[in-house]
């Protein structure tokens, strides 16, 4: 054992969930030690990495976040290659980074809420699971999350999703670019659909939380160069001023229990493969919805032979995301995607309805990524050079667009994360995930989302349509630590506390019992605030 230390509260992970909980504890006068598997790097380094990437690599959101050998994450090349061991009819290929600040470094900032119906699938439609509490219970925590992250969104209730809310957004919605504006008009005029502004963690026209206003450079993914978009790394210095201790390059590999089956300590490796032990009174594991189940399973001991917090055998089960299909259309007239944020609007009403008893809902969005990097290689394949090549790139940049069809998915215990026999650099097992989007999603594509996508393309004046040949992942990791009242079929209670260990909290997207169709980060953050209140009370002995 190289060293041993202690802290009243130990938080594993420095992503949005971890930093939100840490700040609530610090503000309550409770010391916090945070452990991060990966490095802490300046924004300028990531921006420079992105600038130096070849054009073909710029479309991958984590190419400019190279893995460290002791903390690999999924990436197409380099030390993390082959980190996720995937099986099943569909691929659970995720993108996340093990850096200080977590995966909000490269998210789009999209912050949809769940609706009341989204939380009652079993009661209303006879499918999936109900949440352990209702929307009105979660709503105040949504409001706190929106204020904390700095969400911009519409003031008109008719444009909000959902309109049932107690507070206004901190900032007004950002304006639509020309492509989104035209798309909004077309789907309304021809199909009666409402393309509404996205609530997003991005400063609109004003500074907020010591971050500048959005300058509309369309580089939200993979990194906002000016930090106008919220990411958890922007909070780390503030937490340190408030008294937090943050240890980076600390890969937690074991959770230790005592004779009472309380959590006694966590063990971590540093980048030199030396091991350390940190004891404490309360422990929060906030490593994302994939790394947290992996750690719990790795920590099996004589008292917990199936893994920590896993007496229900539900840890790592019910892995979910938003299976998506991308429709690329070639258009008669220019739409000019790429002005403003990469995700700035969406059609959400198509996610709701009684049809959910039969098939999934779907969310349609006009992808506002600038098209030039996507079309350049297609233009080169035509053998064009000089002025002809330049004109073709300009034409395709203006007259092509991607429409994304993102589906909800039901929890399925067979969609499961387990430990692979393949090992990483530290000798720790890599995560293995078996995944099948299921007939609920496939039926939606056949009967609902793809037929509607064809109608949308026709309304836009498409001369050509191309669809992705498989369900791709949205990189919204949910479900592997599902919440519930019954310790026999869930991992955590309504405060994100482990049923098995009273001093262990496992907050985040893993707790979500349903996915709806919108991005999961705002719901994860709301759950973090809810958990933080319980952790503060427990830490103070209230």
Image (cartoon, helix red, strand yellow):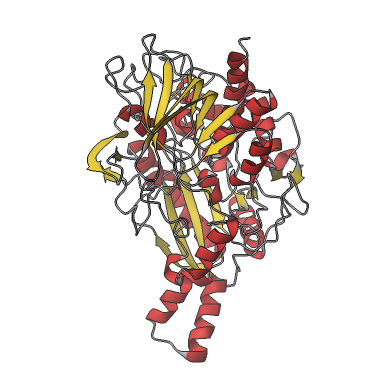
Residue lying farthest to the left in this orientation: 421
Drawn side of residue 416 relative to residue 395, left or right: left
**Image location of residue 25, percent across then percent down:** 63, 25
Looking at the image, residue 186 lies above or below residue 372: above
- Of 382 and 106, which appears nearest the observer? 106
**Image location of residue 473, percent across then percent down:** 41, 47
Q: At x 37% / y 22%, what residue is drawn? A: 256
Q: Quadrant of residue 201?
A: top right
Q: Quadrant of residue 433?
A: top left
Drawn side of residue 302 relative to residue 111, left or right: left
Residue lying farthest to the front in this orientation: 2
**Image location of residue 357, percent across then percent down:** 43, 29
- Is residue 151 visible in the rendered structure shown here? yes
Q: At x 38% / y 34%, what residue is drawn? A: 2
Q: Quadrant of the C terminus?
A: top right
Q: At x 62% / y 51%, what residue is drawn? A: 345
- Is residue 526 visible in the rendered structure shown here? no
Looking at the image, residue 325 lies above or below residue 51: above
Drawn side of residue 331 relative to residue 26, left or right: left
- Of 199 and 533, which appears nearest the observer? 533
Looking at the image, residue 45 lies above or below residue 316: below
Count the labels in the image. 0
Drawn side of residue 117 relative to residue 176, left or right: left
**Image location of residue 240, percent across then percent down:** 64, 38
Q: Quadrant of the N terminus?
A: top left
């Amino acid at each position: 054992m190289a060293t041993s230390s202690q802290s009243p509260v130990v938080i594993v992970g420095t992503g949005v969930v971890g930093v939100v909980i840490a700040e609530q504890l610090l503000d309550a006068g409770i010391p916090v030690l945070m452990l991060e598997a990966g490095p802490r790097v300046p924004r300028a380094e990531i921006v420079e990495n992105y600038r130096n990437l070849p054009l073909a690599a710029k479309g991958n959101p984590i190419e400019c976040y190279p893995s460290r050998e002791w903390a690999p994450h999924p990436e197409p090349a380099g030390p993390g290659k082959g980190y996720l061991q995937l099986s099943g009819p569909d691929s659970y290929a995720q993108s996340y980074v093990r850096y200080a600040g977590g995966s909000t470094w490269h998210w789009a900032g999209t912050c949809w809420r769940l609706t009341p119906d989204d939380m009652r699938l079993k009661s209303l439609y006879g499918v999936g699971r109900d949440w352990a509490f209702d929307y009105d219970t979660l709503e105040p925590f949504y409001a706190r999350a929106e204020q904390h992250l700095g969400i911009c969104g519409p003031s008109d209730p008719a444009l909000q999703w959902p309109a049932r809310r107690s507070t206004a957004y901190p900032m007004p919605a950002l304006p639509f670019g020309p492509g989104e504006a035209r798309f909004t008009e077309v789907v309304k005029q021809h199909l009666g659909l409402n393309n509404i502004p996205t609530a997003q963690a991005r400063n609109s026209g004003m500074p907020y939380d010591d971050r500048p206003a959005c300058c509309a450079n369309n580089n939200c993914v993979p990194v906002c160069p000016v930090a106008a978009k919220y990411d958890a790394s922007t909070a780390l210095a503030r937490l340190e001023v408030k008294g937090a201790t943050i240890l980076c390059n600390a890969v937690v590999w074991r959770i230790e229990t005592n004779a009472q089956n309380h959590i006694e300590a966590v063990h971590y490796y540093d980048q030199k493969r030396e091991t350390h032990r940190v004891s404490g009174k309360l422990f929060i594991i906030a490593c994302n919805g994939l790394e947290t189940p992996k750690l719990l399973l790795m920590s099996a001991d004589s008292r917990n032979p199936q893994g920590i917090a896993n007496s229900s055998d539900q840890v790592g089960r019910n892995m979910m995301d938003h299976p998506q299909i991308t429709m690329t259309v070639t258009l008669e007239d220019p739409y000019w995607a790429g002005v403003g944020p990469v995700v700035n609007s969406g059609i959400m009403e198509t996610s709701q309805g009684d049809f959910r008893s039969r098939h999934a809902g779907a969310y349609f969005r006009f992808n506002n990524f600038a098209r030039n990097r996507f079309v350049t290689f297609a233009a080169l394949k035509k053998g064009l050079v000089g002025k002809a090549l330049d004109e073709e790139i300009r034409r395709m940049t203006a007259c092509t667009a991607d429409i994304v069809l993102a589906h909800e998915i039901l929890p399925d215990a067979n969609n499961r994360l387990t430990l692979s026999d393949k090992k990483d650099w530290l000798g720790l097992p890599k995560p293995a995930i078996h995944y099948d989007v299921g007939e609920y999603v496939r039926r939606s594509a056949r009967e609902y989302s793809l037929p509607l996508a064809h109608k949308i393309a026709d309304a836009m004046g498409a001369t050509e349509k191309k669809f992705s040949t498989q369900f791709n992942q949205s990189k919204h990791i949910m479900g592997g630590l599902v919440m519930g009242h019954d310790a026999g079929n869930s991992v955590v209670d309504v405060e994100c506390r482990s049923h098995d260990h009273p001093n262990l909290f496992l907050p985040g997207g893993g707790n979500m019992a349903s996915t709806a169709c919108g991005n999961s980060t705002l719901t994860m953050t709301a759950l973090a605030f809810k958990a933080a209140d319980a952790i503060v009370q427990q830490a103070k002995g209230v």
